[in-house]
Structures are given as structure tokens and as C-alpha cells.
Amino acid sequence: MRQKLIDALWGTTTRKTWTIVVVVLLIASLVTKFVLPVPPPHVALSGEPIFSSGPAWFTNSVLTTIIVDIILILLALLTRFSLKEVPSGLQNVMEAVIEALYGLAESVAGKNASKFFPWVATIFLFVIISNWSGLIPGVGSIGFYHPTEAHGAEGEGHGFLLDNQLAMAGGSIILAAPEKTQGAAVAAESEHGKFVPLFRAPSADLNVTFALAIATMVMVQIWGVRHLGGGYFRKFFNFSGPNGFMKGINGFVGILELISEFARIIAFGFRLFGNIFAGEIVLATMAFLFAFLLPIPFYALEVFVGFVQALVFMMLALVFFQMSTISHGSHDEHH
Amino acid sequence: MEIDAAKQLGAALAMGLGAIGPGIGIGLIGSKAMEAMGRNPEAAGTIQTNMILAIAFAESIGIFALVIALLLKFV
């Protein structure tokens, strides 16, 4: 038994390296816990500017978006410049991913798949990497304390303490009575200032998800006009019909179509944002309820949710693209 | 009623009422998917994928309610 354990940890060179890495990381995390101040848990609905005196647009989610973009571009370039007849390593993985995505696009869009594929595959890859970037340890927990002069303007600030129930005082978790907790939280606040994380998952910021949603819905209109010409807009402004009553009904249906187009933007944006943001809050809450073992199943759930939401975003974009290429008249004949 | 108390009540109601619909929806989706898998076990793979997609759509309505509740509580 003991020999087996020693073998598993110290048997080969690779195992030795990993054991050393894990032990060093454990010691480092223990040391930093006592050297650096531990941030109180906080919920911020939007990204916060990293530098208190820097530009307001340079928020932590902008920084993480840029990093995600760089990762994706580097992966693409690395694969592009090492293409081989017989694929190996990275190329294998990328080919498998692209093939799976293309199969999905083909199953929904049929012969239009090759036109829609670049757009929806880019969305899928960006969304999945940004969903999972929020799960990397350190994202959301490494950051700076801003001086408290911004504290007076907390009404318009974004940082809020999860007060009343949970607090972190001196690095240990306490479930304290409200007055005591507030005391501890306020003490932590005034000692170091407001905590602003350095990184934040892009999909946990409404700006990013709404930008994706608006771009997708604009592309839907573009594909519609490309396939049906000006006749595409007859979907929205349709006053034809055998009699006055039907004309009115058709006109009203057109208005509904127009509204649903905007409702889709909101649903698109909020679906992704809500899922990822809620997941982060669930993880934080679980970690503060009981720090060991309890967050692990939720962590696995969030990995799965990140994948499913990326898939849902891609599938919906595909379905909307495909729907916009079918003219209203021929659509009615099918029913 | 105090504005703070109203906010807390509103958040609780938004989350609680908003979870009813998606709960029923996910239950229906799951039961129908199980039925379909029982009738046609060979198609279990495709049914499962589509079931997860449909559940994600039903769930997103609950997530909307959660976002509203969070906005009420923290903003």
C-alpha cells in the first residue's frame, strides 16, 4: 500500500515533476494567503475599470476579452503554419473540432452551411473560450485594492459586498451575525479600499454578450437581403390580402415580426450573460459556504453549462440565419 | 413599505415565481425524452443532444428571472 503510494507520486520523472509542481503551488498559495490581503467576496454586475486613474473603458472584462482573442488567433496561426499531410497533435484536435462544428452546421443549414459556417464557428469558439476563462483559478480573485476615495461615490460604483450573511475576515470564513459581519466587511473595506479583480470572464459582462447578439441579428438581416433581395423586408411590412380584414391581420403580424427581432437580441444577450454570471455567483457562494470539496460538482456543472451555452448560441444563430433565407411566401406553402 | 424591504420581497418573488415555469418545462422535456428513448433506444444519442438543447432554452427563462432578482438585490 505504502509502496504503491510512493510509486504513484515519485515513480517516474514525469510524476516527480508533477508532484513537485503541486507541492510548490500549495506552499505558494499558503504563503500568499498570509502575505497578501484576502479580498472580501463581492458581486459586481458590470466590468470595473482596472486602473482607478486610468480610462473608464479599460475594464477587467475588456482585458480578458483581448487575452481570449489573442489565444484564439495564436491557436489559429499555429495550426495554419504547421499544416501537414498526416496531421498530429494540435492539428488533430483542431480538425476534430472543425469537423464536428461543420457537421452541426450542415445538419441545420443544409447547402447554406458553407456560407454560415465561418461566422457561427467563430462565435462558438469565442464564446466557449470566454465562458471557460471565468473558471480558471485567479480570474476574479486576483486584483488590486483601489483607494477608498472612490468609496464616497459607491452609489454609482459597481462593487458590493455580499454582506449580512457571508464575510471573510482575516482569511477565514465566518458565518456571523449581521452587525458583526458588517463590522468586519467595513473594516476590510476601509483598510485596503475597494477590491477590483484584474480579470473577469467576458461572457459575464453584458456589454460583450449584447455586442455578440446585435452583431448576430444584423447578420441575420444581411443574409436575408442577400438571399431574397428587397423582398426580405416584406416579412415586416406586409399589407397584402384578399380583403381589408386580412390586410390588417397581415400588417399586425409584420409588426410582431419586427418586435420579435428586437426581443431576440435581448434574449440572446441575457441568456449567455445570465448563465455565466449566475454560475460565477453560485461558485462564489458555494466556496464561502464550505470551501473544501463542495464547489467541485458545481465546478463541473459550470464547465458543462459553458459548453452548452456556446452550443446554444451557435445553434440559434444558425437557425435564425437559415430562417431568414426562406421567403415568407414559400414558408407558408409548407404548412 | 420601506424601499429596501420592497426590493428584497421583489427579488424573492421574481426568483420564486420565475422558477415555476422553467421547472415544469424541464420536467416535461425530460419525461418526453425518456419516453422517446424507451421506445427507440437506438436514437438515444440524438434525443439526448436535443433534450439538452431544449432544457437550455427552458432554463434560460429561469435565468432571466435570476438576473432580475440579482439586479433588484444589488443595484
Image (cartoon, coloured by chain):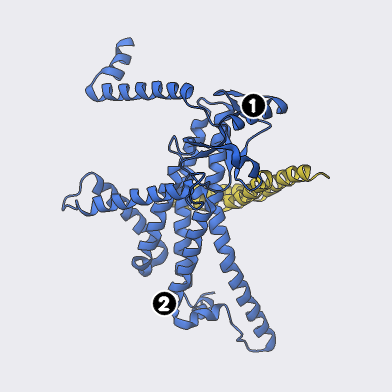
The label on residue A226 is 2
Of mark 1 and mark 2, the one earlier in the sequence is: 1
Whether residue B44 is visible here, answered yes or no, is: no
Q: Which residue is drawn at 52% across and 58% down?
A: A210
Chain identifier, yellow in the render: B
The label on residue A62 is none
Q: Which of A219 and A86 is in front in this view?
A: A219
Q: Which residue is drawn at 43% across and 38% down?
A: A136
Q: Which residue is drawn at 45% across and 68% down?
A: A219
Q: Do the residues labelled 1 and 2 touch (CB within 8 Å)?
A: no
Q: Where is residue A7 in the image (x, y as percent from the top left)?
A: 28, 16
Chain identifier, blue in the render: A
At label 1, which amino acid type do we have? Ala
Q: Mark 2 lies on which chain?
A: A
Instruction: Report how far apart the C-alphas of labels 1 and 2 lie in the structure.
Output: 61 Å
For residue A6, above or below residue A286: above
For residue A43, above or below residue A335: above
